């Protein structure tokens, strides 16, 4: 399985965020995205996840399930945690476990999905399963958000600064999880400002200032 | 409906609503007691019992 | 009122009082029903006067509940009494139920007398608006996640509502007489003669006792609910990750 | 696919019924509108009977619209919408399921409350069943058309104010046939079936077309 981006460009809010961008992520490989704020790290992740429009260039996932779109192979954990305060912790997780499930894609992912209570224990918030999510702290919300990665088997992980709000235990847990994912043949792209204790290729964004295009028509 | 029907209907609805209220109070009490028991079983102590300011 | 200000002491005290309250309410209610059904039928309305024995107490309780909420709201805003919001929040659904009963029994009483289920009579209309005010209070309470945060806003709404009751009463009466549709019939009829007054009083006391019993029980539930919530927040904040 | 749809439907209804949810808000709003109308037009029962159906329908329309602007905005703000687009469910299906859940928690209580409120407007008890039937046939159309407005304003902070303005003109056909169906049922020179079938047709049309339009509008929010 291989994820490649060729000559990618993206326009958001009328601004050319990046252009002519290439990258390649093979099975078992981690690509960390570096660059100052506003360099387009989050935008690139959203573009890969299908949440932002590709102005130019091409994104391809080789080895993916045939007629299943790229975004259904992808776990995306952004700054927003998609947690409903009125639902209990385990209800939130069970919902996403069911929604993000896909047989063909699960067959490709190295590790099988685990059930929500086990995922909560793995993330260290097992005892809070039946509590309303409204009472979670920021760090606990982040752990619940990351628990999504365990309850549905998807080969490609896109994590946007996942270490924010996590304490040292949380970060250790996260890195162990990513490490297990990669060793079982998964792919991961992580936008981060923190050095990751994992072998990783680096793609730095925002180095070349994209020259303003006179009249760029969004695709 | 004859007059009796109206009287019966009025008393029936009153009985249903009042019984519903009583049932709600009892059931709700049981639910809260169960949740409280479960929490105390897990060894979670409330913060200072005697503080008057807290409605807990 | 102040000596059992502390919720914990209230829980202990109410635990012992509650069984007596339930017993008293049931007893007086039974007596009231017996008296009501043995009272002579009204010469004009026939047997339907029996509905009065539950309609009038319901309407009184509807008003009384709102008064309880209003006084509790003063307790919340002025003295920041810990039990005030608990009392108001426990009383609102009960008040809404009694108001609903007053409306339904009023309509069931009106049908045999005026031939229509609902008449925009000044009294009934005011009770309808009171019902809407109850629903408004409950809706505002349910809009907040944290019950403690809901206390003061709802107290203000309750007091504003309470101050408005006489104004509403006056304007509805004026609106009613202004239009004076032919079909309106003076609601409560001639003065109630003594033989029927006595069962009515007993039924009113029975309903009041019932309200007190349910209200105290509901307050206990509300306190337990807040303890559960506080303990969950504490559990979450002191959670030591397993591994 | 079916399991995911059922799970989404269950979550939407649970959220609406929980504290802070908007489930019964529509019914209370409906009751309020019907209750205050006679204060404006006077308590004359004959007059109320004539304009009863109109009051019920305008009330149902406004009660449906008030809860709609948060239908997508809440999920957009907490990131759920992003994730929902990455599931196996096409966006149009997601919109349809959310609209159906919204109708069950907001529209259905209106249909249930309508007969009670009909009594206040001096509608004959015999006609109350028909009133509820016409509302049951028409309110889904109001909800589904409303989702287009909710989708268009998802990214706007003050979107809530815009939805009624955008949507009311689109709901006029439903209002016309709804009121005439209810009138036919209540005072009834005309048979109920004619306007009712047209109303049902409008509802089916909106149930099919509105999600597609709303999904297209939602996709615009991703730029």
Image (spheres, grey):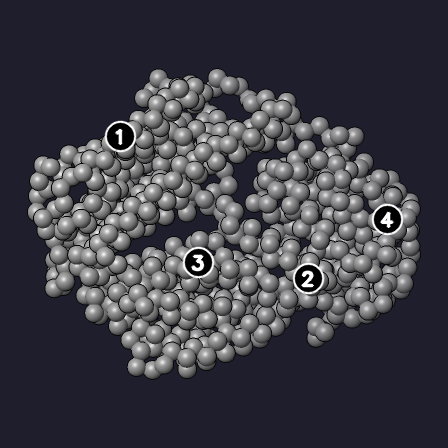
Residue B10 position within the rendered picture, expressed as x and y whole percent measured from the top left:
28, 49
| Figure disc tally | 4
Query: Which residue lies under the disc numbered 1?
Result: C28
Left or right: where A101 falls relative to D94: right
Q: Which mark is residue A111?
A: 4
Q: Quadrant of residue C209?
A: top left
Query: Which residue lies under the disc numbered 2?
Result: D2
- Neighbour tally class for label 3: few under 14, some 14-19, many 20 plus, Cα within 10 Å: some
Residue at image x 48%, y 17%?
B50
Q: Which mark is residue D109?
A: 3
Q: What subunit carries mark 2?
A: D
- Disc 2 and disc 3: Cα gap in Å? 26 Å
Name the element at disc 1. helix
Q: Which mark is residue C220?
A: none
Residue D175 position within the rendered picture, expressed as x and y whole percent measured from the top left:
40, 74
The one of D92 and C201 positioned closer to us in this rendering:
C201
């Amino acid at each position: 399985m291989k994820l490649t981006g060729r000559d990618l460009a993206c326009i958001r809010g009328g601004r050319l965020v990046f252009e002519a961008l290439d990258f390649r992520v093979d099975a078992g490989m981690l690509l960390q995205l570096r660059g100052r704020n506003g360099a387009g790290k989050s935008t690139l992740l959203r573009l890969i996840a299908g949440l932002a429009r590709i102005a130019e260039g091409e994104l391809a996932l080789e080895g993916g399930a045939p007629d299943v779109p790229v975004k259904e192979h992808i776990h995306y954990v952004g700054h927003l945690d998609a947690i409903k305060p009125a639902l209990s912790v385990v209800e939130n997780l069970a919902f996403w476990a069911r929604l993000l499930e896909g047989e063909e894609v699960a067959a490709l992912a190295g590790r099988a999905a685990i059930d929500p209570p086990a995922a909560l224990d793995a993330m260290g918030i097992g005892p809070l399963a039946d509590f309303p999510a409204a009472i979670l702290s920021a760090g606990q919300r982040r752990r619940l958000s990351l628990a999504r990665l365990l309850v549905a088997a998807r080969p490609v992980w896109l994590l946007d600064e996942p270490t924010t709000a996590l304490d040292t235990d949380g970060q250790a847990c996260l890195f162990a999880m990513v490490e297990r994912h990669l060793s079982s043949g998964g792919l991961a792209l992580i936008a981060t400002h923190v050095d990751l204790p994992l072998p990783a290729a680096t793609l730095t964004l925002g180095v070349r200032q994209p020259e303003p295009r006179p009249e760029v028509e969004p695709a | 409906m004859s007059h009796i029907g109206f009287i019966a209907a009025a008393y029936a609805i009153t009985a249903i609503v009042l019984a519903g209220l009583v049932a709600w109070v009892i059931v709700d009490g049981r639910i809260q007691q169960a949740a409280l028991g479960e929490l105390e079983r897990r060894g979670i102590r409330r913060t200072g019992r005697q503080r008057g300011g807290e409605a807990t | 009122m102040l000596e059992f200000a502390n919720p914990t002491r209230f829980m202990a005290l109410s635990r012992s009082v509650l069984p007596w309250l339930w017993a008293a309410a049931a007893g007086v209610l039974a007596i009231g029903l017996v008296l009501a059904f043995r009272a002579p039928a009204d010469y004009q309305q026939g047997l339907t006067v029996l509905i009065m024995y539950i309609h009038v107490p319901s309407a009184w309780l509807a008003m009384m509940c709102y008064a309880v909420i209003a006084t509790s709201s003063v307790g919340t805003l002025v003295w920041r009494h810990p039990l005030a919001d608990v009392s108001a929040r426990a009383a609102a659904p009960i008040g809404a139920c009694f108001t609903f009963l007053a409306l339904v029994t009023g309509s069931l009483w009106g049908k045999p007398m005026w031939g229509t289920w609902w008449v925009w009579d000044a009294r009934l209309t005011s009770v309808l608006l009171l019902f809407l005010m109850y629903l408004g209070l409950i809706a505002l309470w349910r809009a907040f996640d944290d019950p403690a945060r809901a206390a003061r806003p709802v107290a203000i709404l309750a007091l504003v509502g309470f101050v408005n009751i006489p104004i509403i009463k006056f304007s509805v009466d004026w609106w009613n007489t202004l239009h004076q549709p032919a079909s309106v019939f003076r609601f409560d009829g001639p003065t109630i003669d003594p033989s029927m007054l006595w069962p009515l009083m007993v039924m009113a006391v029975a309903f009041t006792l019932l309200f007190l019993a349910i209200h105290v029980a509901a307050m206990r539930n509300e306190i337990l609910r807040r303890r559960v919530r506080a303990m969950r927040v504490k559990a979450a904040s002191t959670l030591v990750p397993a591994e | 696919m079916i399991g995911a749809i059922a799970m989404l439907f269950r979550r939407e209804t649970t959220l609406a019924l929980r504290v802070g949810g908007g489930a019964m808000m529509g019914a209370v709003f409906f009751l309020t509108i019907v209750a205050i109308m006679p204060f404006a037009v006077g308590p004359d029962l004959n007059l109320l009977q004539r304009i009863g159906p109109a009051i019920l329908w305008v009330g149902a329309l406004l009660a449906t619209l008030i809860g709609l602007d948060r239908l997508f905005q809440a999920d957009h703000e907490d990131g759920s919408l992003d994730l929902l687009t990455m599931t196996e469910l096409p966006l149009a299906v997601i919109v349809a399921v959310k609209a159906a859940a919204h109708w069950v928690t907001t529209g259905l209580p209106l249909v249930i409350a309508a007969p009670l409120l009909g009594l206040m407007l001096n509608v004959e008890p015999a006609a109350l069943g028909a009133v509820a039937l016409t509302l049951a046939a028409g309110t889904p159309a109001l909800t589904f058309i409303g989702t287009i407005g909710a989708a268009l304003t998802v990214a706007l902070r003050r979107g809530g104010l815009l939805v009624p303005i955008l949507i009311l003109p689109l709901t006029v056909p439903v209002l016309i046939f709804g009121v005439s169906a209810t009138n036919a049922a209540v005072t009834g020179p005309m048979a109920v079936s004619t306007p009712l079938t047209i109303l049902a047709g409008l509802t089916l049309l909106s149930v099919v077309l509105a999600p597609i339009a709303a999904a297209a509008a939602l996709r615009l929010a991703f730029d």
